[in-house]
Amino acid sequence: MQRRHSCRRNFHPLPSVHYPVIPAHRWLSLFLIACAGAAQTIQSVLPSGGSHPTSLAPGMLMSIYGSGLGPETACTGQADTARRETPSPQRPLQTFAETLIYPTRLCGVEVRVGGLPAGLLYVHSRQINFKAPQQTPLQGAAAVQVFRDGRPGPSVTLKLGLEFAVVTLDGPAFTRMPVWIRVWMPHGWQQNLQYPFGVAPGDFACHSVEVRRNGALLPRLPPGPPRLSGLGGGGLCGFLGLPGPAASRDRLPLHLQYRFDQPGDYEVRYILNPDQPAVLSEWTPIHVGDATPEARRAWLQRASAGAPRDAADIVTSFLPSVLGIPDDESLEIVSGYLHHPEDLVRRFAAAGLHYWPGDQVRKAMLALLHRRGPSDVLVDALNPAPESPEAADLVATAIPFLSSDSPALLRGALTLLSRLAFYPGRPLPAPLQARAENALLDAAPHVERTAGPQTLTDYAAALGRIRRPRARVLLWDFVNRRIAFSQAVIALTWNRDPADLPRLAALLTTPAGDARPRHDLAVLPYALHQAYGAAALPSLEDALRHSPHVWVRTACARELVLAGRAPGFAFMAGALEKNLPYKLELLQFLRDRFPELRGADEAAALRFARSRAGEARPGLLF
């Protein structure tokens, strides 16, 4: 009744002399059509939940705002949960909701995009939520029109294309200075841009930024180290797991990919996932002013004096701003973070060293090692060779740091000594070699108290390179107390001591003491076979029959098959016959090991294993 009253108030009939003779029921129909037409308006079409207009692309969720668009009582469209749409190849990166199938008619309302029916999520008098058809093109424009009960209503024309980002400079830009851009992502994509994306500072993951000057593209700086571990997930491209909030959300340090040596006008374009573009920006002009070397030195002094203490601020803002321009002053600043207590900061700073020439970095790292000690990332960056002229000096420098309370320095010292002293064939003077070995053996209690799991593993490996009874005793102590267990048992095999073989073999059949499978023993059969050869095979056959650990049994079977022993083939035949969970793993092993089985089906592999097993099959534990 309210709608009739409102329409009557705004309805202005023509003079009576122009009235045609129309039946009463047709008057009512025309009256209602006029009411609906007068009330229907479209005020705006925006991304669902967004506040700024954008281009329309396949699968996008959009909202129409206006009046008279649908019923006063809202209707919700239920997605077809049994089916999904294939995303348009023009926009393959779509959210789960964008691939759901929604009804194209809801409470008498339809929306057509360029004549194509759109999926309807919600209809109401003042709002319609719809999903653009996957057939929507990415070029040109299309009319978005609302229909009610089959009758066409108002329409608007929208530009077609990928969703657009907006690029701006994040502060004034100058040569020899950091150039940060801010990328204003469209609604729904904001979480995807949280720099840094890994510990390599110049790695923007799937965020691509192109820069051109006078119409010509600028070359990117040489890539740094490959992306390392540390991604924390989230978003399309992932982002680095930080100990605090990112200071560079929606910002990118453009100077880490491009060198702005000349002042003047440039153009910048952003693309999200260039292989399958999802979001892009227009070419955006930016201006880069001129700054002198003196201005940069003064800026570096101010930046260093006000450097943040928070690890997240260091890797998201401070270090990226300092990096990119390879001068002596910035190298000194970055080198200072190679001993930072936070592992993430050390790795980020080390990854940034690639901006400087290798010879310059090596010289600086050697000086820093002697001045402050061998941190883990410093040793990795230096990567000294055992035949280098400074090898003996580096070993002498590293030995005292085996007693350091800093996990980074302790790990660095152990890494350096492992590369230069505790490995076969290292050409060290005998007194220095003995000094290093004694220091390593004496450091056992301190390492156990101070080191993390990886350093303990490295320590066990270093012990295995020392041919002394004391090292063997320490390794067995680690084995008995389950410290760096897997590495300790492998290190014991390196000595090839006959007395160790039965003790090591006994581990294969020892109950775990709990319900967990003993994955840490899976490498031992291989290590025993490599170290002791045929002498280890009887022990492996015994473990194949009696070990309670499935990973041990399968590992023993592989080594026995490699040695041509029938019990190994019998075990594999049994696994295939009984369709055991590890059947496919062993089947692939047989195909890889024996050329005649490559491409063979399971039945052929089973016949092959049976033929090699002979009479060894009965009694095996599967």
Image (spheres, helix red, strand yellow):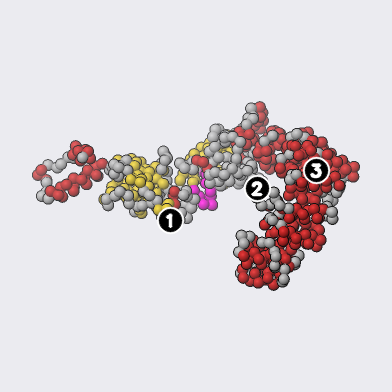
Q: Position of residue 431 (x, y in %)?
A: 90, 42
Residue drawn where x is 15% and y is 47% of the image? 27
Labels 1 and 3: the sequence-earlier one:
1
Q: Position of residue 98 (x, y in %)?
A: 44, 49
Per the model, the C-alpha gap separating discs 1 and 3 is 60 Å
Looking at the rendered structure, the kind of residue marked 2 is: Pro
Q: Nearer the viewer, mark 1 or mark 2?
A: 1
Q: Is residue 121 left or right of residue 173?
A: left
Per the model, the C-alpha gap separating discs 3 and 2 is 26 Å
Q: Nearer the viewer, mark 1 or mark 3?
A: 1
Furthest-right residue in view? 431
SS at circle 3 = helix
Q: What range is drawn magenta here?
A: 267-278
Q: Is residue 552 left or right of residue 125?
A: right
User: Which residue is identified by label 1?
Assistant: 83
- Mark 2: few, some, or many residues within 10 Å (few <14, many ≥20)? few
Up-down: is 611 above or below 314?
below
User: Which residue is identified by label 2?
Assistant: 226
Looking at the rendered structure, the kind of residue marked 3 is: Leu
Labels 3 and 2: the sequence-earlier one:
2
Residue drawn where x is 42% and y is 53% of the image? 81
SS at circle 1 = strand
Please tell me which residue lies in front, 303 or 596.
596
Looking at the rendered structure, the kind of residue marked 1 is: Arg
Quadrant containing the C terminus is bottom right
**CB contact under 8 Å: marks 3 and 2:** no
Labels 1 and 2: the sequence-earlier one:
1
Per the model, the C-alpha gap separating discs 1 and 2 is 39 Å
